[in-house]
Amino acid sequence: MAQSRRKPPRVGDGPIIRRVLIGTTLFFGAILVLAPLIVIAVEAFSQGLKAYAATIAHPDTRHAILMTVATALIAVPVNTAFGLAAAWAITKFDFWGRRALLVVIEIPFSISPIVAGVAYLFVYGLQGLFGPMLEAADVKILFALPGIVLASMFVTAPFVARELIPLMQAQGRDLEEAATSLGASGWRTFFSVTLPNVKWALLYGIVLCNARVMGEFGAVSVVSGNIRGQTNTLPLHIELLYHDYQAAGAFASASILATLAVFTIIAKVALERRGAGRRPALAAAAKDQNAGTSP
Amino acid sequence: MKIRLDQVVKTFDTFRAVRGVSLDIESGQLVALLGPSGSGKTTILRMVAGLEYADGGHIYFGDQDATDIPVRDRGVGFVFQHYALFPHMTVGENIAFGMKVSKTRRSKPEIAARVQELLRLVRLEGLGDRFPAQISGGQRQRVALARALAVDPKVLLLDEPFGALDANVRRDLRRWLREIHDELGITTLFVTHDQEEALDLADRVVILDQGRIVQEGTPAEVCREPNSAFVMRFLGDANRLSANVRGGQAFVGETAIEAEASSDGPAEIYLRPGDIEWQPAGEGLAASVVRVLDRPGSRRVLATVEGGAALEFDVPPETDVRAGQEGRLTIKRARLYPA
C-alpha cells in the first residue's frame, strides 16, 4: 500500500461519480434541511430581540411550552417503563403470542398519527365508546392533558422497545443466569447486570422518544381541541400563530422547538459515540467468547 | 457434598431431553458427563444447578431434597460455556459480585482480600483491574471459575469448560483444573463432548446417549470394558467388522478372531487402531493398503480387508508401508457385540 501513491480507485469510485454524488447530497441537504433552519432563526429575530422575548413571554406561548414539557414528563417515563418491560418480556421469556406482541409494538410506527388521534376521539369522545361514562364520572380525557399524553404515548410506544430488543436478544440470558446463580435477586440482577449492559441503547431510545413527544403534531391536534392557552402544545401553538399571520411569533416559538431538536440530536450523537466507544470492545469480546463453540 | 439424582426427567415441548436418569456422585469426586450433542448432558447439569427444573424425579444434595430449591439458594458454582462474565465489570468486580449480593454480609476489606486470594488461586494476580474484553479466552475461563468459587459453593458445575479454547490451552487448563479440584476437594460435575477431556480429568465418567445413561465408571472401566457398540465407538477411533459366531468362535469371512463370543449368530467386531498388527506376509486377515497418513509418533494406515470392509490401524513410524501393498493383519484384541 505504502509504495503506491496513487490509490487504485475502487469499483464505482470514479472522480465524476464522486463529485456528482457528494454535490447532490450537499445541495439537497442545504435546501431541504439547512435552509429552513436558518429561515427559522432569521425570521424569529426579524423584528428584533425584544419582539422575540415578548413572544416567548406571552402567556399563551408559556402555557404551550408548559403543556409540551408536562406531556413529555409523563409520556416519556411511562413509555420507557413500557419499552423496558416489553423488551425484557420478548427477549428473556418464551410465551404464546410473543411474535404477535412484537408486531403490535411496531404498529404505531406504520400508522399515521392522525388515525391514532381519530381513534382516541372515537373511544373517549362524547359520542364514543366510553365518552358518556367518563362524562358522568366527570373525567376529562379529550381536549385536556390526559388525551394529549395518551395520543403522544401511542405514537411513541415503540421507540424504547425497538432500541432495546435487538441488543437484548443478542445478549441472551447467560448474564442473568450467571448473576442469579451467584445469589443475586431479580432486582439486583436487573440493576447491576441487565441495565448497565443496555444503558446506552436505553438512553438513545429515551432521547428519540422525547424528541417525538415534544414534536408530535397530528395525533395531538385531533385530541387537544386547539384551545389557546389551555390545551395547546408547542407545535399546535406554532400553527395557530401562523394562521393568525403572526409570522415572527410563529418562528420564535418554532425556534424553541428547533433548539430542543438540535439538543436532542447532539445528545443522540454523543450517545452513539459512547455506545460506539464501548460496543466494538463488547462485540469483540462476545465474538471471542463465542468463537470455537463447535470445533 | 454428595449429589444424588433419582429418576430425573426433563421434557422440552415434545422433546424428551432427559429420560429417567439416576446417578450418585460421591462427595469430593470429579465427574464428567460425556455424550454427543443432544444427549441431555447440559440439561442434566442445568437441573443440578437449578437453572432448569426437573419435570420428574428428585435431586438430592446430601440428605436434602434440592429439587425445588431455586438456583439462588442452592449454593452451586456454575461456570458457563461462554463464561458469561459481566462485560461492564472488571475481573475483580466480576469475582466479587457473588460476595456482594450474598445474604451473608461481608465487609469490603474482607471481600477485597478474598478476591486477591482467588486471583492468586487462578494465577491471574495483577489482572484484577482489566475488563473481560481485555484478557484472553483462557484467562476469561479462569475468571469464570474464580467467580464461581467465590461464593464457597457446595458443588461446582462446569458446562463445556474448555470448549471455546484452542487445543494447547485446553490441555494446560485441564491439568490445572484437576490440581485445583484436588486442592479444594469440592464435588465437581462437568459436561463435555470430548472423550479425551473426560478421561483425562474425571474420577468417574458418565456416558450419555439420547437422554439416558449408557455406561458409567472410572476411565479405566469404560475404556477397557465398553458395554455397548455405542460406547466403544464414542470413546475413540474404532473399526467395525461384520462377523459370524459359530460354536463360540467369531469368524470374519473364514478367518477366526480371538474374542469373547456368547451366542451364535451375526455379530459386530470392534477393533481399536492399536489392536491391529501389520505384517507384510504370514498368517491373519488379508488386507491391502489404501493410504498411509503420517503422524508425529506413528503412521496411520487405511486398508481394506477381504469382503471390502475398511480398517484403520497404526504402525511404528519406521515401518515401510505404501499404498497398494498387500499384507496380513493379526488381531491382538477385539470386542464383540451382537449385531
Image: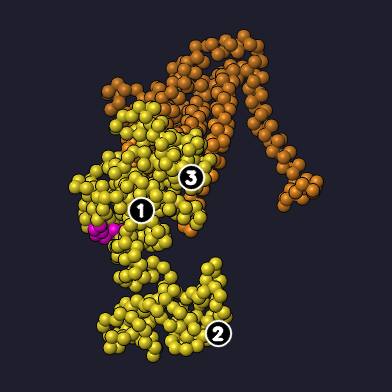
* Mark 3 closeness class: few <14, some 14–19, many ≥20 residues within 10 Å: some
Task: Look at the numbered disc 3 and give the secondary structure of its residue.
Answer: helix
Label 3 to label 2: alpha-carbon separation: 50 Å
Residue type pointed to by label 2? Gln
Vertical arrangement, residue B243 with respect to residue A236, above or below: below
Q: Earlier in the sequence, mark 1 or mark 3?
A: 3
Kindly give the residue lying farthest to the bottom in the view shown: B254
Indicate the quadrant where residue B330 lies: bottom left
Measured from the top left, where is residue B19 in percent x and y?
A: 26, 60
Q: In the shown orientation, is residue B212 left or right of residue A118?
A: left
Give the alpha-carbon distance from disc 2 to disc 1, as whole Å.
46 Å
Q: Which residue is mark 1?
A: B190
To which chain does the residue with label 3 belong? B
**Which circle's residue, 3 or 2, is located before the other in the chain?**
3
The residue at which mark 3 appears reads as B139
Q: Secondary structure at mark 2?
A: loop
Label 2 belongs to which residue?
B325
Q: Amino acid at mark 1?
A: Phe
In x, y percent, where is residue B21? 25, 59
Range of magenta residues: B17-23
Write the residue at 36% across / 61% down: B35
